[in-house]
Image: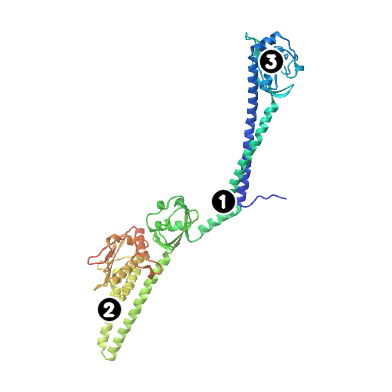
């Protein structure tokens, strides 16, 4: 059977963590046992040295070595055996300067030469070592034996059974393995917990699938024609796709920075940051009308989607203007029908001269209004807009006046943007004038050129704008009108006016009109 490496991320992490934990525990146990064994050997040699030093310090031992012979029942053997039994040493050997034993655990060895060279000890040096002798392997120590005058008369060799040292090491291993096993169990349980948490977070996705999912996500985010901005739990930008960068004017350096650092204060920033509640929120960025939706994520962050509704908004407003113009034409149709009935009656009555005068008077009135606009505003789109708005204003009972100061002798660079600005201002002025019923309601339009700058001024006889709200009315989403009557929402027109003006280096402001009303410049 072939053992296959698991494909799931959590299974791979679990196996890797268990293997690492096991390896670390085995390594730690080995690293502990090696110095522990050395420490036990050193401890045994120190113990042997201490016993040998104590025995050699006895002055009677040196005196008896010089005054007696090496026999199994001699005083040196008796003294050495007494010390051995009291200390638990394996052996205590007392030798003379020739290396002949005067004491030994095996009395048959008394009188024989020692099995190892005592030269270093008889030269006055203390020796510690692990060695093998006649009684087997032992931890031994040798010290010189001196007489009361300080002369070396022999040596004392003490051995500690190495089996007892090895036994201490073996006795310590089970306890060490128990601790290591407990630590390993804790490590395995922790690895299982981490793997389960990772399984929930990765939804059991295989390692190969993660790379594919990331590639698909990148392709999807940068390929869709909808802006996507992702934020982390601290409000920092985590991701900006290409469309969002285009709509908001952000570059790749925006990632990792706070939203307030890369966008100016305003409704757009508030909508993206979640400081404005709701769905399909309208915002204006760089002259573009955006629809934003913010969705919170489980890690405390959020994802904001942006749709560009600029063209749709402009088309909608043009449709509103067209609808208004159709209403005005419908009303004019009724008016023209009445005028035709009048002409027919005059003809039937034989009042031909009066019929001619009546037709000439009606035709000249309409022609004079259109010609007056065309003479003062030479851009065809703007003059057509004013003619259409004049008809709509007449239908609503409001007079649309052209200021005597109006003079736009040349075509403008981008008439569509100026049409948007002028159309929004006139529509708002008509709404405000119709809301406030006065004796002679009117809206006055002034268009003039100052060098390479177009100055647009629209005044009305409406209720005016209070000073405390003159800045707020240019903010996206702010409106005094109800949004129920507009399928596209309110609070966008004046925001577009200001953004388009600022795009060309201009400005937009509102002041009060003498006699009541507002003046937008």
Badge 3 or badge 2: first in the primary sequence: 3
Q: Let me know if residue 158 appears in the view.
A: no
Q: Is residue 62 left or right of residue 388?
A: right
Badge 1 or badge 3: first in the primary sequence: 3
Disc 1 to disc 3, C-alpha distance: 72 Å
Reading the image, the residue beneath label 3 is: 79
Rate crowding at label 2 as few (under 14), some (14 to 19) or many (20 or more) other CA atoms within 10 Å: few
Give residue 197's mark.
1
Nearest to the observer: residue 370 or residue 160: 160
Q: How many marks?
A: 3
* Quadrant placement of the C terminus: bottom left
Badge 2 or badge 1: first in the primary sequence: 1
Q: Secondary structure at mark 2?
A: helix
Q: Quadrant of residue 413?
A: bottom left
Reading the image, the residue beneath label 2 is: 364
In the displayed orientation, state which residue is furthest to the bottom: 349
Percent coordinates x, y for residue 455 in the rendering:
29, 62
Q: Is residue 415 above or below residue 357?
A: above
Percent coordinates x, y for residue 263 in the rendering:
40, 54
Q: Is residue 480 left or right of residue 68?
A: left
Q: Secondary structure at mark 3?
A: helix
Instruction: Tell me, yes or no, whether the two marked residues, 2 and 1, touch with CB atoms within 8 Å.
Output: no
Nearest to the observer: residue 93 or residue 78: 78
Closer mark to the observer between disc 2 and disc 1? 1
């Amino acid at each position: 059977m072939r053992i296959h490496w698991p494909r799931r991320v959590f299974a791979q992490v679990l196996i890797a963590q268990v293997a690492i934990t096991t390896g670390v525990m085995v390594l730690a146990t080995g690293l502990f046992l090696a110095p522990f064994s050395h420490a036990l050997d050193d401890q045994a040699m120190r113990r042997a040295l201490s016993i040998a030093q104590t025995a050699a310090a006895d002055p009677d031992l040196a005196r008896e070595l010089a005054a007696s012979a090496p026999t199994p029942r001699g005083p040196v053997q008796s003294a050495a055996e007494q010390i051995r039994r009291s200390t638990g040493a394996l052996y205590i050997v007392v030798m003379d300067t020739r290396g002949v034993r005067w004491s030994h655990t095996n009395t048959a060895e008394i009188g024989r030469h020692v099995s190892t060279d005592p030269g270093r000890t008889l030269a006055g040096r203390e020796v510690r070592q692990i060695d093998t002798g006649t009684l087997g392997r032992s931890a031994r120590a040798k010290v010189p034996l001196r007489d009361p005058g300080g002369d070396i008369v022999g040596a004392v060799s003490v051995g500690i059974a190495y089996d007892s040292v090895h036994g201490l090491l073996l006795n310590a291993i089970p306890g060490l393995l128990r601790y290591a096993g407990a630590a390993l169990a804790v490590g395995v349980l922790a690895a299982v917990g981490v793997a389960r948490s990772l399984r929930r977070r990765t939804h059991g996705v295989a390692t190969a699938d993660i790379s594919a999912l990331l590639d698909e996500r990148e392709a999807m985010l940068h390929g869709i024609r909808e802006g996507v901005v992702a934020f982390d739990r601290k409000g920092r930008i985590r991701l900006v796709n290409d469309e969002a960068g285009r709509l908001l004017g952000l570059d790749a350096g925006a990632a990792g920075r706070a939203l307030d650092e890369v966008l100016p204060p305003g409704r757009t920033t508030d909508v993206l940051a979640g400081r404005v509640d709701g769905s399909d929120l309208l915002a204006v960025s760089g002259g573009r009308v955006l629809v934003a939706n913010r969705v919170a994520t489980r890690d405390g962050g959020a994802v904001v989607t942006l749709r560009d509704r600029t063209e749709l908004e402009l088309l909608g407003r043009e449709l509103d203007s067209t609808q208004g113009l159709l209403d005005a034409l419908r009303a004019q149709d009724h008016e023209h029908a009445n005028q035709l009935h009048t002409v027919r009656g005059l003809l039937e009555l034989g009042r031909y001269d009066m019929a001619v005068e009546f037709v000439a008077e009606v035709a000249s009135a309409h022609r004079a209004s259109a010609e007056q606009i065309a003479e003062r505003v030479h851009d065809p789109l703007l003059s057509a807009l004013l003619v259409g708005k004049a008809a709509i204003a007449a239908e609503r009972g409001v007079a649309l006046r052209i200021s005597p100061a109006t003079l736009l002798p040349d075509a403008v660079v981008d008439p569509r943007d100026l049409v948007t600005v002028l159309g929004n201002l006139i529509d708002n002025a008509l709404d405000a004038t119709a809301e406030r019923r006065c004796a002679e309601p009117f809206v006055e339009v002034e268009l003039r050129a100052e060098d390479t700058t177009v100055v647009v001024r629209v005044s009305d006889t409406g209720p005016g704008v209070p000073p405390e709200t003159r800045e707020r009315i240019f903010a996206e989403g702010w409106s005094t009108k109800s949004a129920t009557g507009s399928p596209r929402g309110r609070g966008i027109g004046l925001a577009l006016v200001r953004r388009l003006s600022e795009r060309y280096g201009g400005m937009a402001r509102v002041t009060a009109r003498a006699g009541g009303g507002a003046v937008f410049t």
